[in-house]
Amino acid sequence: MSVARQTAIGLTLAGLIMGGWLALHVWGIFFQPLDGPVLAIVPLMILTQSWLGAGMFIIAHDAMHGSLAPGRPRLNGIIGQICLGAYAAFSFRTMNVAHHQHHRAPGSAADPDFHAERPDAFRPWFFGFFTRYFGWREFSLVTAVLIAYLLLGARVANLILFWAVPASLSALQLFVFGTWLPHRHGRSGADFADHHNARTIPMPWLVSLLTSFHFGLHHEHHLSPNTPWWRLPEIRRATLATGSPDSSPGSRV
């Protein structure tokens, strides 16, 4: 696929995800009523916002690898920061450095996204993962936005339902399918195919999309980190066709 085509598709999908997330965020916080028959759609709105929130993070993740707009690092950085900033006031630069360290030493004590002391434990790993990136800076910025929303007339219930809950669910979603399941050790220890220390979570295409924008195809991502999220199923098919875990196009850490 040409660079121009990949860029066009990547930016189009990013625009749809970002636009959908922003529209639901604003509508839910400021305009969605919480009484009457419309209450029936609230769970669907929360789940959709959670999924789009995960998509915002995945866009930034592609930007970290330069696969959102290949050959345009400044554009990747700007879009990545917008997505992470809107998601939870995260710093693109900080997360970018940590993520590339993750790829240099996946599943080891040098991996900032790995829990070397308890490589099979969910709760301490998730707590460490969350607090590593969401510190006082992020808390202060989110609090400032929260106060601004309240001053603009947002109701506390709407803020909880359409901001706090979807953000928490998407963080859990990304951790489970993008970090814990792909990199955790089993009861008998590590059971990975190669030095990437990552496994793929086999799922039908639609389930893979809905759970984590194909981030569960994690071994393929480590084999070909410069492949955007929407092409990971293609890499998966190529890997299965050759029968070799290290034969994926663009394989490198």
Image (cartoon, rainbow, N blue to C red):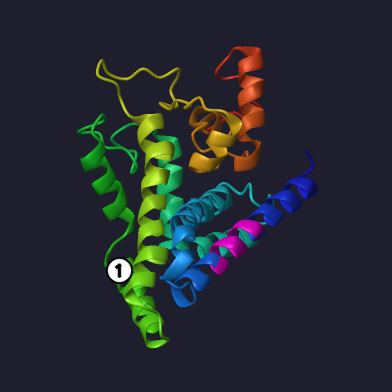
Please check the rendered image and state whether residue 20 is part of the magenta-colored stretch, yes or no: yes
Q: Is residue 96 visible?
A: yes
Q: Left or right of 12: which side holds 223?
A: left
The magenta stretch is 16-23
Q: Position of residue 156 (x, y in %)?
A: 32, 75
Measured as percent of width and height from the top left, residue 189 is found at 27, 18
The amino acid sitting under disc 1 is: Phe
Left or right of 122 in this view: 214: right
**Would residue 90 be visible to someone looking at this image?**
no
In the structure shown, which secondary structural element does the residue marked by tag 1 occupy? Answer: helix
**Picture quadrant of residue 39:** bottom left
Instruction: Identify whether 232 is placed above or below 98.
Output: above
In the image, residue 129 lies in the stretch drawn in magenta: no
Q: How many callouts does the rendering have?
A: 1
Relative to residue 144, is residue 14 depicted above or below?
above
As drawn, 120 above or below 113: above
Magenta span: predominant SS is: helix
Badge 1 is on which residue?
A: 139
Q: Position of residue 167 (x, y in %)?
A: 39, 58
Is 246 placed above or below 124 here? above
At a point 36% along the width and 78% down the height, the residue shown is 155
Question: Residue 85, position in %: x, y?
Answer: 46, 66
User: Which is more toward the observer, 249 or 209?
Assistant: 209
Q: Check the picture and name the quadrant holding the N terminus.
A: top right
Q: Nearer the viewer, residue 44 or 116?
A: 44
Q: Residue furthest front?
A: 37
Residue beneath the point at 33% across and 29% down? 184
Closer-to-camera residue (23/93)? 23
